[in-house]
């Protein structure tokens, strides 16, 4: 009887009925075999596997292992199986205990002999043996290995030492074959020893000799042998792919090599070792980079941001190489010449540029900062301007044009009363082609129908897009994955009487990057975030319905203008997200909210994102930085609009979600004054900070009207109903 799997690697079962668990556990091994035959992923030791009736497997955690999910309908659950004795690591190996050694990886054989990993069949050379398929591991599998076994709490300078210690516990020292892969050739080798401290394996060529080149040039056995002798028969482990073995004896070896290879290819940076901070290296660098890797792989990051990230990374690596060359040349020289002084100055400039790029990389790598600050860069849409002929065109969009529909269009849209001059008309079968054909001043009329759009509606010219009928009869649905659905950069865009439906997107259903966009009598069925009003952009949204966003229904960025009148915003994660950075380069967004109904959202109806700012003591030159309640007192001397007492409390917390509201006020209306007061307080606080900076420079301003900064706030008549956390909250970062 095999010993049970280590308790530390066995996650708690999902909350199913106890009787169902006992019944399903009895036939778990049989279903595990079925999952390997039908499911796309491998079986993982210590993980709870959900199997649907179609035979597919679904992890009890999501692909990133962050939260437990409820079992899918009609799902069956397989319990973790016991680990056979013949697959356990030797007790004395690596100097650790049996429990420690056997838990250095999350993988085993699930109660039956043989490997638990899949095989990877070579694409070209049939003579080459199969290798282990290890490049499809889930987020939590890599996360657990790096956090618990490989890196733990090491510093950046200790990474190689900790990695070597991890390999000593799980890597077979000899007796296994591997494919040595380079950018030029692939060669089959046999590992005879491992230099753990150098993260290298001592290898010999296999007999018979197998070699395949990528460029068509043949390499003889003598050439490869000479190359190995130059390398002292040692190859980096990251260049080796372990040959598949059905016994399961080398599962741990294949996974350990994969973890090392993945770490140095995707997570390690050449400058990390010099940034030897006292903070935990894993939490500071590895975890955010690992999350970003999987966010990119799962299409959760805008493609333009991914391109920027890789570009910044390449620039930083190139500058760092130049910096190292320059530093080494200065270190090897003993003279003090003018040329060396110039080199020192150049080195300082390179260092500053590298630090600047590193900060940009960290901003993108950190998921919270990436969300809070958002991605404010947009596709460089080129406006066409006015058509060279000077005429404007009306574009009619209809899948099929019936005579009755044409007569109605002529009567309603092109009657002599509405058209005083001759007008050119073009017909299109889908909205995307109509938008792409537009020049400034054109109009698009979309007839009733269901239109599937492959691509992004990029509106760079001032046009009008209107539906001919009720919004529910004019559905424009985005098909396939993409960053955004509708992007507006024109000075004046009007969209009315259409229903927009979005699926599998990274960014929101509508992004207003610049200019003014008017959205009237529309229905927005979202899946990610809803409408984003970027810095310096303006949105007027009237009598529209927005729902289904997994993020915020409306995101309002600093420096923007947003007017919401008579809308319904519901069944989103958050209703409205207002971003205020308290930075001198950003103004508080100018917001008007009148008669909106914000209800049934998972979190708050309205959330304000702002930094935690420590209040400074009064200074004779800079005045006093007032807190929220003090500002409210200045704004409302009679006390009618005082900010709730919890404002003081949440400023002391530091970060996180903080609710607002008082128990004695109706939930339907309590948010209006609180939102207005909070935005006014933030605006005045920023005004005081600006005055203080100017005062320190010896500059004073004539206008000292405290009310001038808050006049733009108009938040009245809104109703907040059944929002999960309340009407209004603040997120401090």
Image: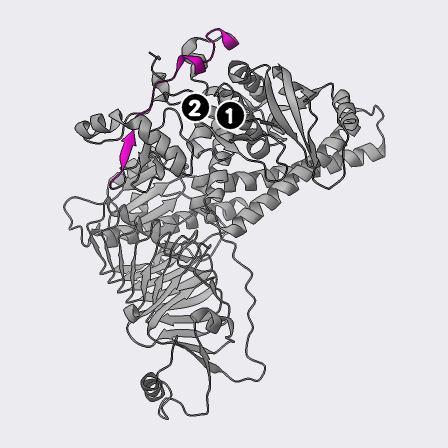
Image-quadrant location for residue 165: top right
Q: Quadrant of the N terminus?
A: top left
Q: Secondary structure at mark 2?
A: loop
Where's residue 173, x and y in %?
58, 14
Q: Earlier in the sequence, mark 2 or mark 1?
A: 2
Q: Dots 2 and 1: beta carbons under 8 Å?
A: yes
Number of residue marks: 2
Q: Which residue is mark 1?
A: 255
Q: In the drawing, what numbered circle is on residue 107?
A: 2
Q: Nearer the viewer, residue 376 or 579?
A: 376
Q: Name the residue: 30% across, 76% down.
A: 469
Main SS type for the magenta part?
A: loop
**In the displayed structure image, the side of residue 605 where residue 175 appears, left or right:** right
**In the displayed structure image, the side of residue 260 where residue 456 appears, left or right:** left
Q: Name the residue: 48% across, 63% down.
A: 514
Q: Which residues are magenta?
A: 74-94
Q: Name the residue: 32% across, 40% down.
A: 657
Q: Nearer the viewer, residue 472 or 386?
A: 472
**In the displayed structure image, the side of residue 653 where residue 687 appears, left or right:** right
Where's residue 154, x and y in %?
52, 20
Q: CA distance from mark 2 to mark 1?
A: 9 Å
Q: Quadrant of the C terminus?
A: top left
């Amino acid at each position: 009887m095999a010993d049970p799997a280590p308790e530390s690697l066995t996650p708690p079962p999902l909350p199913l009925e106890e009787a169902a668990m006992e019944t399903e556990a009895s036939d778990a091994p049989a279903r595990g075999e079925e999952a390997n035959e039908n499911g796309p992923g491998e079986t993982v030791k210590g993980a709870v596997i959900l199997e649907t009736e179609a035979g597919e497997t679904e992890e009890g955690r999501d692909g990133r292992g962050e939260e437990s999910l409820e079992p899918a309908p009609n799902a069956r659950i397989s319990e973790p199986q016991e680990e056979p004795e013949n697959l356990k690591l030797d007790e004395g190996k690596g100097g650790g205990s049996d429990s420690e050694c056997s838990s250095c990886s999350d993988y085993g054989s699930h109660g039956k002999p043989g490997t638990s990993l899949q095989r990877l069949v070579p694409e070209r050379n049939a003579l080459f043996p199969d290798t282990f398929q290890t490049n499809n591991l889930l987020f939590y599998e890599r996360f657990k290995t790096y956090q618990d076994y490989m890196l733990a709490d090491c510093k950046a300078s200790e990474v190689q030492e900790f990695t070597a210690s991890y390999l000593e516990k799980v890597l077979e020292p000899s007796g296994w074959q591997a494919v040595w892969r380079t950018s030029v050739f692939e060669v089959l080798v046999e590992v005879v020893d491992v230099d753990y401290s150098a993260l290298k394996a001592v290898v010999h060529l296999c007999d018979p000799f197998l070699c395949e080149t990528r460029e068509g040039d043949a390499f003889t056995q003598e050439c490869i042998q000479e190359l190995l002798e130059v390398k002292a028969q040692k190859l980096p482990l990251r260049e080796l792919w372990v040959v598949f073995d059905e016994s399961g004896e080398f599962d741990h070896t294949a996974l350990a090599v994969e973890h090392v290879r993945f770490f140095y290819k995707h997570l390690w940076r050449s400058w990390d070792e010099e940034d030897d901070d006292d903070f935990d290296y894993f939490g500071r660098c590895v975890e955010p980079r690992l999350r970003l890797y999987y966010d990119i792989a799962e299409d959760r990051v805008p493609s333009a941001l991914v391109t920027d990230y890789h570009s910044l990374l390449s620039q930083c690596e190139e500058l760092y190489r130049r910096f190292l060359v320059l530093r080494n040349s200065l270190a090897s020289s003993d003279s003090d010449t003018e040329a060396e002084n110039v080199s020192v100055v150049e080195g300082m400039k390179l260092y500053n540029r590298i630090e600047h790029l590193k900060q940009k990389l960290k901003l993108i790598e950190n998921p919270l900062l990436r969300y809070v600050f958002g991605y404010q860069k947009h596709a460089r849409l080129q406006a066409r301007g006015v058509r060279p002929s000077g005429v404007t065109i009306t574009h009619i969009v209809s899948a099929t044009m019936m005579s009755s529909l044409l007569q109605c269009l002529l009567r309603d849209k092109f009657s002599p009363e509405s058209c005083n001059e001759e007008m050119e008309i073009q017909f299109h079968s889908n909205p995307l082609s109509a938008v792409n054909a537009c020049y400034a001043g054109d109009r698009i009329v979309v007839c009733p129908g269901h239109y599937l759009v492959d691509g992004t509606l990029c509106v760079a010219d001032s046009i009008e897009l209107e539906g001919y009928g009720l919004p529910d009869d004019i559905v424009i649905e985005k098909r396939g994955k993409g960053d955004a659905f509708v992007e507006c950069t024109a000075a004046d865009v009007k969209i009315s009487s259409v229903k927009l439906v979005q699926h599998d997107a990274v960014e929101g259903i509508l992004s207003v990057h610049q200019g003014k966009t008017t959205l009237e009598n529309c229905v927005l069925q979202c899946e990610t975030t809803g409408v984003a009003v970027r810095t310096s952009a303006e949105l007027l949204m009237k009598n529209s319905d927005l729902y289904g966003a997994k993020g915020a229904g409306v995101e309002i960025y600093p420096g923007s203008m947003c007017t919401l009148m008579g809308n319904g915003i519901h069944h989103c994660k958050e209703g409205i997200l207002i971003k205020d950075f308290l930075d001198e380069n950003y103004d508080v967004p100018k917001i008007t909210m009148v008669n909106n109904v914000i209800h049934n959202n998972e979190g708050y109806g309205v959330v304000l994102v702002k930094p935690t700012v420590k209040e400074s003591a009064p200074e004779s030159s800079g005045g006093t930085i007032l807190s929220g309640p003090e500002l409210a007192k200045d704004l409302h001397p009679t006390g009618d609009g005082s900010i709730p007492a919890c404002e003081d409390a949440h400023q002391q917390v530091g970060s996180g979600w903080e609710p607002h509201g008082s128990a004695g006020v109706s939930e339907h209306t309590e948010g209006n004054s609180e939102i207005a007061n909070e935005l006014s307080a933030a605006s005045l606080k920023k005004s005081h900070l600006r005055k203080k900076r100017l005062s320190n420079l010896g500059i004073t301003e004539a206008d000292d009207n405290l009310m001038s900064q808050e006049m733009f706030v108009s938040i009245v008549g809104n109703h907040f109903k059944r929002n999960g956390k309340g009407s209004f909250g603040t997120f401090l970062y």
